[in-house]
């Protein structure tokens, strides 16, 4: 259930610029529990950074828990098991993201793009086309 809910929540978030959260998006994020808000806010930020800094990709989804469980500690999330989708393909991703205490503003982010995830592995990781 968690995987489905986070995917649905990411859609409206992913379409908004990371640095210009509109009132509706802010309101939606504030309705989430703090851990989910942290994960969603960092997912959005890493998606936007990949889009801005890597012209070879056109990311439209990030899943922080695709191949492993993220570690959340206070205002920080670390994951070596994330994935992002670009042009219909999924790629491995790891990132470390820190937010303000309300989990609404990203203050630090490091990420590394990994290898393409083979299509035959998508079902195993609950990824979709």
Image: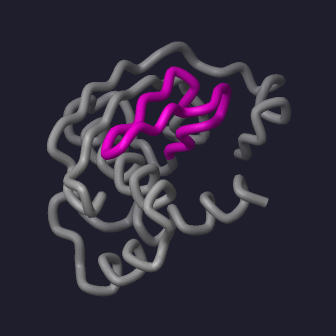
Measured from the top left, where is residue 35 in percent x and y? Answer: 48, 54
Q: Quadrant of residue 101?
A: bottom left
Q: Which residues are magenta?
A: 62-82
Residue drawn at (62%, 59%), measured in percent from left and top?
7
* Residue 122 drawn in magenta: no
Q: Is residue 81 left or right of residue 129?
A: left
* Closer to us: 26 or 71: 71
Residue drawn at (50%, 67%), measured in percent from left and top?
33
Measured from the top left, where is residue 106 in percent x and y? Answer: 21, 49
Q: Quadrant of the N terminus?
A: bottom right
* Closer to us: 104 or 48: 104
* Residue 63 drawn in magenta: yes
45 lies above or below 116: below
Measured from the top left, where is residue 16 in percent x and y? Answer: 31, 67
Q: Quadrant of the C terminus?
A: top right
Q: Is residue 9 left or right of residue 20?
A: right
Residue drawn at (72%, 60%), measured in percent from left and top?
4
127 lies above or below 94: below
Measured from the top left, where is residue 67 in percent x and y? Answer: 67, 26
* Closer to us: 82 or 31: 31
Q: Quadrant of residue 113?
A: top left
Q: Is residue 63 left or right of residue 73?
A: right
Q: Residue furthest top?
A: 115
105 lies above or below 79: below
Q: Quadrant of residue 15?
A: bottom left
44 lies above or below 11: above
Residue drawn at (25%, 85%), measured in percent from left and top?
23
Q: How many marks?
A: 0
* Closer to us: 113 or 65: 65
């Amino acid at each position: 259930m968690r995987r489905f809910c986070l995917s649905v929540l990411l859609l409206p978030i992913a379409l908004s610029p990371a640095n210009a959260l509109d009132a509706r998006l802010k309101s939606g994020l504030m309705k989430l529990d703090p851990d989910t808000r942290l994960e969603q806010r960092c997912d959005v930020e890493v998606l936007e950074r990949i889009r801005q800094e890597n012209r070879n990709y056109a990311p439209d989804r990030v899943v922080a828990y695709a191949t492993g469980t993220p570690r959340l500690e206070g205002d920080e999330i670390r994951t070596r098991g994330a994935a992002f989708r670009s042009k219909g393909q999924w790629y491995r991703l790891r990132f470390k993201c820190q937010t303000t205490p309300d989990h609404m503003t990203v203050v630090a982010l490091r990420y590394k793009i990994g290898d393409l995830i083979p299509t035959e592995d998508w079902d195993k990781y609950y990824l979709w086309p």
